[in-house]
Image (spheres, rainbow, N blue to C red):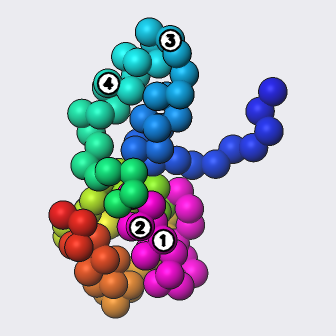
């Protein structure tokens, strides 16, 4: 039974799958490893820093995508925020935080 639905980034997916003892879980974890750019502690710190910006337009699912993609420019940010319009100041703040983890 599903108790709750919460977006998780690829690093967290790999962490969850590592606790499951099955061949399929290992295959999926191996696949996600190809796309992970951060360690689990770095991903959590990045999420926390983005949340601490206090930008009301940014929801949890946006933060997860930022951690997964690590956008480097305004165009990348716009690909994540297709449903929300961010001003240039908000975009700059996000990019400055992400830049620390590249």
Label 1 environment density (alpha carbons within 10 Å; few <14, some 14–19, many ≥20)? few
Q: Residue at x 29, y 52 (%)?
A: 38
Q: Specify the label residue 78 is tagged with.
A: none
Quadrant of the frame with the N terminus: top right
Q: Are marks 2 and 1 in contact (CB under 8 Å)?
A: yes
Where is mark 1, residue-wise?
48
Q: CA distance from mark 4 to mark 3?
A: 12 Å
Q: Earlier in the sequence, mark 1 or mark 3?
A: 3
Indicate whether 85 appears above or below 41: below
Q: CA distance from mark 4 to mark 2?
A: 23 Å
Q: CA distance from mark 1 to mark 3?
A: 31 Å
Q: Are marks 1 and 3 in contact (CB under 8 Å)?
A: no
Relative placement, left or right, of 45 versus 101 is right
In this rendered view, identify the residue nearer to me: 19 or 36: 19
Q: Specify the label residue 30 is tagged with.
A: 4
Where is mark 2, residue-wise?
45
Main secondary structure along the magenta-highlighted residues: helix
Which structural element holds mark 1?
helix
Label 3 environment density (alpha carbons within 10 Å; few <14, some 14–19, many ≥20)? few
Relative placement, left or right, of 36 versus 83 is left
Q: CA distance from mark 2 to mark 1?
A: 5 Å
Q: Earlier in the sequence, mark 4 or mark 1?
A: 4
Which structural element holds mark 4?
helix
In this rendered view, identify the residue nearer to me: 9 or 22: 22
x and y percentages locating residue 70 in the rendered image: 27, 59
In this rendered view, identify the residue nearer to me: 52 or 85: 52
Q: Are marks 3 and 2 in contact (CB under 8 Å)?
A: no
Which quadrant of the structure image shows residue 102? bottom left
Does residue 80 appear in this view?
no
Label 2 environment density (alpha carbons within 10 Å; few <14, some 14–19, many ≥20)? some
- Give the extent of the magenta segment: 43-61
Indicate whether 15 appears above or below 56: above
């Amino acid at each position: 039974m599903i108790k709750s639905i919460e977006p998780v980034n690829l690093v967290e997916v790999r962490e969850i799958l590592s606790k499951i003892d099955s061949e399929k879980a290992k295959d999926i974890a191996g696949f996600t490893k190809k796309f992970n750019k951060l360690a689990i502690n770095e991903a959590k710190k990045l999420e926390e820093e983005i949340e601490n910006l206090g930008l009301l337009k940014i929801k949890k699912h946006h933060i997860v995508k930022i951690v997964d993609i690590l956008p480097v420019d305004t165009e990348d940010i716009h690909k994540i925020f297709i449903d929300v319009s961010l001003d240039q100041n908000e975009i700059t703040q996000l990019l400055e935080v992400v830049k620390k983890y590249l």
